[in-house]
Amino acid sequence: IPNNLMPFIAQVAVGRREKLAVFGSDYPTPDGTGVRDYIHVMDLADGHIAALKSVGKTSGLHIYNLGTGKGSSVLEMVDAFAAACGKPVPYELCPRRPG
């Protein structure tokens, strides 16, 4: 299983896991959980291809931001997944992980 949020949420939703461990609830965010700019891997791959196709068309250094520009918290993702699948996604707030 990939070690990222969405597969773990899905495993809880289908009953493979009892609950989701949410690491950290003391971040300086509205709900205290970590905020990330989530992007689907296929969208990221499409962005990489588009960036590579533009290389050499103009001179200089170019920066390509492949995010959405809007972060979502862990609990926002849990709530969105639960709403989309029509099932609750139980979770437990745990201490932050090291690192």
Image (cartoon, rainbow, N blue to C red):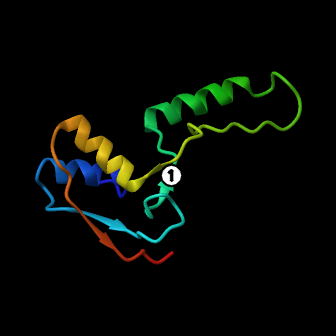
Residue 66 screen position, x and y as percent = 60, 37
Outermost left residue? 15
Neighbour tally class for label 1: few under 14, some 14-19, many 20 plus, Cα within 10 Å = some
Image quadrant assignment for residue 17: bottom left
Tell me the residue at 37%/69% (across/down): 23
Towards the viewer: 14 or 28: 28
Q: Is residue 60 visible?
A: yes
Position of residue 54 relative to residue 44, above or below, is above
Tell me the residue at 41%/69% (across/down): 25
* Left or right of 67, for residue 2: left
Tell me the residue at 26%/51% (across/down): 9
Towards the viewer: 47 or 98: 98
Query: Mark 1 = which residue?
Result: 36
Q: Secondary structure at mark 1?
A: strand
Q: Is residue 6 visible?
A: no
Image quadrant assignment for residue 67: top right
Position of residue 57 relative to residue 17, above or below, is above
Residue 90 screen position, x and y as percent = 19, 58
Residue 28 screen position, x and y as percent = 54, 65
Outermost front residue? 30
Amino acid type indicated by mark 1: Arg
Image quadrant assignment for residue 62: top right
Residue 71 screen position, x and y as percent = 52, 47
Position of residue 58 relative to residue 71, above or below, is above
